[in-house]
Amino acid sequence: MVFPAFDIIGLIQAVGYIGLFIIVFAESGIFVGFFLPGDSLLFAAGLLASQGFLDIIYLIPLLAIAAILGDSAGYWTGKKFGRRLFERPESRLFRKERLARAQRFYERHGGKTIVIARFIPIIRTFAPIVAGIAEMRYRRFLLFNVFGGIFWVASLTAAGYFLGALVKDIELYILPIVGIIILISLLPALVHVLRRR
């Protein structure tokens, strides 16, 4: 979902470290968190850290832990409750052949899917849940979850931090910068839709 930059900045200032932790945790793997801002939130948090509102030393490890725990929670939610959806014979959406297809896909591409999904809104919320439903081995999932969580948080937060430190009066450019971040994060999904058509 698209949030105006000034709302994101205001949101971060209002909720602080604890609120950021909860938002990243929820968006990373809790079903209800798919609408939350992820990439733009991390980037804006980095910008605020460059201006002294947050400490980058605490920010990156804290949010990386939130992302890793969120994906793990999503995985176990999918593993525990997801398969029940496929046991209902009348379900059109949750068919057993789709489950079998998901299992084959995660056996072949599960690791890179977990990492790449971090950078795609909405997909990042559902990828760990589907990994759990498809019974991807947890040790393998955790390896890519940890790598992807750290890489996602560190890259976007550090990008915001260094850009904020380099550009004078960065607050004047926050709206277009965050807009570009949102557009870039939506591009892979858009390309996929266009290819399918």
Image: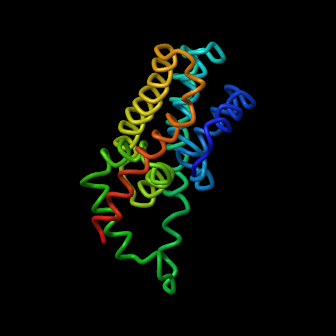
Residue 18 in picture, x, y percent from top left: 69, 29
Residue 116 in picture, x, y percent from top left: 35, 44
Residue 16 in picture, x, y percent from top left: 70, 26
Q: At 31% from the left edge and 68% from the top edge, which residue is drawn?
A: 101
Place residue 184 in its image quadrant: top left
- Front-lying residue, 189 or 110: 189
Q: At 38% from the left edge and 69% from the top edge, which residue is drawn?
A: 99
Q: At 49% from the left edge and 26% from the top edge, which residue is drawn?
A: 157
- Front-lying residue, 180 or 50: 180
- Front-lying residue, 151 or 74: 151
Residue 99 left/right relative to 171? left
Vertical comparison of 53 with 97: above or below? above
Q: Looking at this rendering, what residue extends furthest in the left direction? A: 108
Q: Looking at this rendering, what residue extends furthest in the right direction? A: 14
Quarter the C terminus occupies: bottom left
Residue 2 in picture, x, y percent from top left: 57, 49
Q: Looking at this rendering, what residue extends furthest in the bottom direction? A: 90
| Colour option used | rainbow
